[in-house]
Image: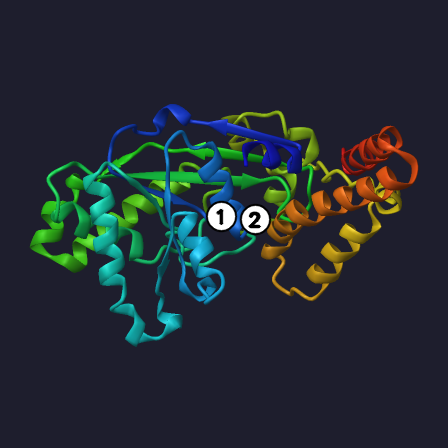
Amino acid sequence: MKLVLRLYFRKIKIEGRENVPLNTPLIVTPNHQNAFLDALLVGAFIPISLHYLTRSDVFTWWSKPFLRLMNMTPIYRIRDGYAKLSLNDSVFEGCQELFSKEGSVLIFAEGNHGKHYYLRPLTKGAARLALQSQEAMDKDLMVLPVGLNYFDHQAPKSTVLISFGKPIPVNEYIEEYRKNQAKGLIKMRDAISAGMKESLVIPEETPNYDKRSKTIFQESHEDKSFQELRSVDPSLEIPRAQKKRKRHVLAWLLNPLPLYIIHRIIRDIDDVVFHSSLKFGIGLFVFPLWWLLIFWIMFFSVGINIALLTVIVMVFGLFYSYQR
């Protein structure tokens, strides 16, 4: 997964990896801007094994076995119906069993996804999981905020900066929770929110948000560090670089069927947050199948040397076309 993610993105920058606690019960709370790519990026580049709390509606009769194999567990939200919220009790019990073995769980604390760079209001789910688990165990539980900062939410061969924040000790909030559960949950939620904001280049929505985001997240700034991006003057009149599309014709000439399938599916998806994830996920399967098909056709018609050369040219043409 690290390899294919690095092929899909132009650059994956990681800061704060030293903040990740090892051999410690841990709740990982990234922001959620890009559908399932968010979970893949954190899971691939965090130096520990993760289990994932995943929206329950993706667990169908055919996907459930596969998702379980990927360490995914359904979590139920209000939109799934109030009757189903009680099912989260057994989910939290399963998490507590993982924590007792120094396991780690990823949960999207915002509760939904969105394409904006700033942090949206958090639900109480992550705070409730943290405090209920800490109260039920002797080991010290930590919460790790993670910031995913995309330079482009939709295009391949763009840059993403993963920032691991400072871990938050849950036991610092357990006494307040025991005195007053409602106030304890709010304080824990606010602490998680503050930690996540510290991991984002643009932590909050501001009146000049649109201009600020376009000024910061442009191609010429992709080599800047997290702190350098945060200090970019939002008043600078720097237009966002225009993408070069002419070379994409080469990709379509060499790989027409996979690109048609991807664009045909994405065209019917209104929520743009899914676009990049679908490009990655579908491409992960259709491109290798396409190259394998062409290889066998060429192998049986003109021989292995021409078959190999043809596939190499197709692969090179795809990645060359989408370089910037």
Residue 308 position in % (x across, y down): 82, 31
Mark seen at residue 201: none
Q: Amino acid at mark 1?
A: Tyr
The residue at which mark 1 appears reads as 118
Query: In the current view of this chain or complex, which residue is farthest to the front?
Result: 300
Disc 1 vs disc 2: Cβ atoms closer than 8 Å? yes
Q: Nearer the viewer, residue 152 or 251?
A: 251
**Residue at 69% of width from left, 33% of height from top?**
219
Looking at the image, tell me whether mark 1 or mark 2 is earlier in sequence order: 1
Q: CA distance from mark 1 to mark 2?
A: 9 Å
Indicate the quadrant where residue 81 lies: bottom left
How many numbered markers are drawn?
2
- Colour convention: rainbow
Callout 1: SS: loop
Indicate the quadrant where residue 323 lies: top right
Indicate the quadrant where residue 310 lies: top right
**Residue at 24% of width from left, 69% of height from top?**
86
Callout 2 crowding tier (Cα within 10 Å): few <14, some 14–19, many ≥20: some
Mark seen at residue 209: 2
Answer yes or no: is residue 222 visible: yes
Q: Nearer the viewer, residue 200 or 139?
A: 139
Residue 203 position in % (x across, y down): 46, 43
* Quadrant of the rendering where the N terminus is positioned: top right
Answer yes or no: is residue 200 visible: no
Position of residue 247 in the picture relative to residue 272 (left or right): right
Q: Nearer the viewer, residue 239 or 314?
A: 314
